Each structure stands twice: as structure tokens, then as C-alpha cells.
Amino acid sequence: MVFRALFWNFRSAFQGGSFTLSYRPSSNNTNEVTMQGIRVLIADDHQEFRRIVHRFLESFPNISVVGEAIDGIDVVSKTEELNPDVVLMDIAMPHRNGLDATRIIKQRWPSKVVVIVTMHDDEAYRLRAQEAHADGFILKSTLKPSLEATFGEGSRLLATVSALNGARSRNC
């Protein structure tokens, strides 16, 4: 069962991964939240980093990692194929960098949430992420607490999905 009337609108302060989340009903069916909760795609060219993030995210009860991408071309393809709610995107990847991939994803699927995850703590990268229409910016050095704040118990993202899942259950 799928809840189809959801449009995610993430706004980021672009300050170390602090996010606010709002949502509004949408008449289109481009973004769906399933019974699995939040569907996440991890894009990074380092296998060990993807494995660590995957394992960490799977520890959250309402997160489902639907796939991993190894480069900027792969992440665009897998976004279309796997329909994630959130894409965690590295900047420095082969074949197409994460900023270019973000720009493409946001042009094709504006309601997808793309969060840049990078080691580059430089205002120029934050600005470039904003220009690519990324929804958030997390430093790899603060990854664990930033992901806990974004996806953990008590987060607005989790609360919103839980409320929508409850409303869907009552309407079925």
C-alpha cells in the first residue's frame, strides 16, 4: 500500500546538517512513502563507507536502504529505478560528480530529497550544493550525529512519516 498524496519539502540551513522539514499535500503521485518508511539510496564511490552508512541506517526501524550507487551516473539511474525518498550523495565521485548528479535528480524529480554527504568543509562547496538544489549538507566528520538527528527517534522526518503511515492505516 502506498500513500500517494505527499510532497516533501526539505529546507536546510546548510549548517552542519541541521534540517527543518515541512510537507504539504500534493495532487501529483511523484513521491510515495511506503510501509517500509523512508527509502534511502546511498551514493559514494568508497565501498567501505557505503557499507558503514548502510549498516548504521538499517539500525533505524523506519529506514529502508533500497540501494547503493558507486558514481554519479549510477546514482541517477538508481534514483529512477529504485524510487528512493532520500539520496545521500557524496560530492567527489567518478564519471559525474555528486553536485552534477544532484542537479540532474532535482531537475527530473524535484520532490526527491538529496543530502550532500562530504568531507569538504568549505563554504564554496556549501554554496555549490545550494546552487545544485541540494536539500541538505552533512560533513562526513559529523555523520553519525547528523544522521541520528535527521533519521532518529524524535526527528521531524520520522514523526511525519509515522503520522502519514497511521493516517493511511486508518483510511484503508
Image (cartoon, rainbow, N blue to C red):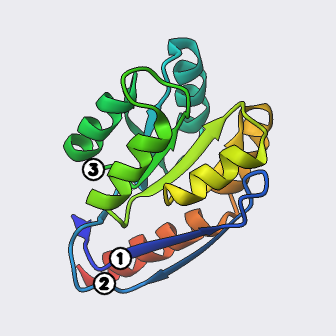
Q: Quadrant of residue 67?
A: top left
Q: CA distance from mark 3 to mark 1?
A: 14 Å
- In the rendered structure, are the residues bearing label 1 and label 2 in contact, judged by CB atoms less than 8 Å apart? yes
Numbered disc 2: secondary structure: loop
Q: What residue sits 36% from the left and 22% below the top?
A: 95
Q: Which residue is mark 3?
A: 83
Q: What is the crowding at mark 1: few (fewer than 14 residues within 10 Å), some, or many (at least 20)? A: many
Please tell me the numbered disc located at residue 6. Answer: 1
Quadrant location of the C terminus in the rendered image: bottom left
Height in image: 136 above or below 92?
below
Q: Which residue occupies the foreground of this view, 9 or 1?
A: 9
Height in image: 2 above or below 46?
below
Q: Amino acid at mark 3?
A: Asn
Q: Amino acid at mark 2?
A: Ser
Q: Which residue is mark 2?
A: 26
Q: Which residue occupies the foreground of this view, 95 or 38?
A: 95
Height in image: 84 above or below 18?
above
Q: Is residue 129 left or right of residue 165?
A: right
Numbered disc 1: secondary structure: loop
Q: CA distance from mark 3 to mark 2?
A: 17 Å
Height in image: 89 above or below 34?
above
- Image coords of residue 54 (percent x, y): 52, 29
- Image coords of residue 163 (percent x, y): 49, 76
Please tell me the numbered disc located at residue 137. Answer: none
Q: What residue sits 30% from the left and 66% below the top?
A: 31
Q: What residue sits 57% from the left and 37% below the top?
A: 57
